[in-house]
Image: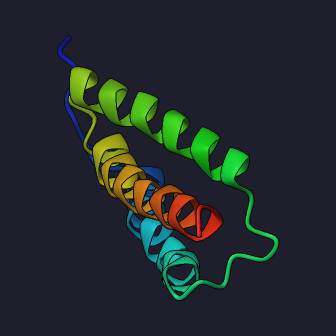
Amino acid sequence: MTKQKTNSTFDNIAMAAAVAMPLMTIPQLASVLKGHVEGVSLLTWSLYTLVSLVFAIMGYKRRDKTLIVAYVPMFLLEVGIVGGLLVVHTK
């Protein structure tokens, strides 16, 4: 018996979440880039960035579209947040 790839309801929900997750991060990036960084942790966002990189690489290696769609944009957004925090904190 061969395994067939089918999109289950859960797969569709997971893909929707993968798309939504980066979209929900955009307001945080916008705030940081405007200089509103009170209460935003450099350590936390740096760790989020590292975790996103790990999952993006895992998605690429496993050819898992859901992980790639979720974590490549998250990694890029998080790099922007960390970069923005570093710029604001070094002023």
Q: Which residue sits at x=25%, y=43%?
A: 65
36 over 11 or under it: above or below: below
Q: Residue 74 appears at what percent x and percent y?
A: 42, 56
Q: Residue 69 appears at what percent x and percent y?
A: 30, 53
Q: In the image shown, does 31 or 74 lie closer to the viewer? A: 31
48 over 31 or under it: above or below: above
Q: In the image shown, does 79 or 2 lie closer to the viewer? A: 79
Q: State the quadrant of the C terminus.
A: bottom right
Q: Is residue 49 left or right of residue 45?
A: left
Q: Which residue sits at x=66%, y=85%?
A: 36
Q: Is residue 73 left or right of residue 54?
A: left
Q: Residue 15 appears at what percent x and percent y?
A: 38, 58
59 over 30 or under it: above or below: above
Q: Is residue 20 left or right of residue 6?
A: right
Q: Which residue sits at x=26%, y=22%?
A: 62
Tell me the colour scheme of the image. rainbow
Q: Which residue sits at x=57%, y=77%?
A: 32
Q: State the quadrant of the N terminus.
A: top left
Q: Residue 63 appears at what percent x and percent y?
A: 20, 29
Residue that lies at the very extreme toward the right in this rendered image: 39
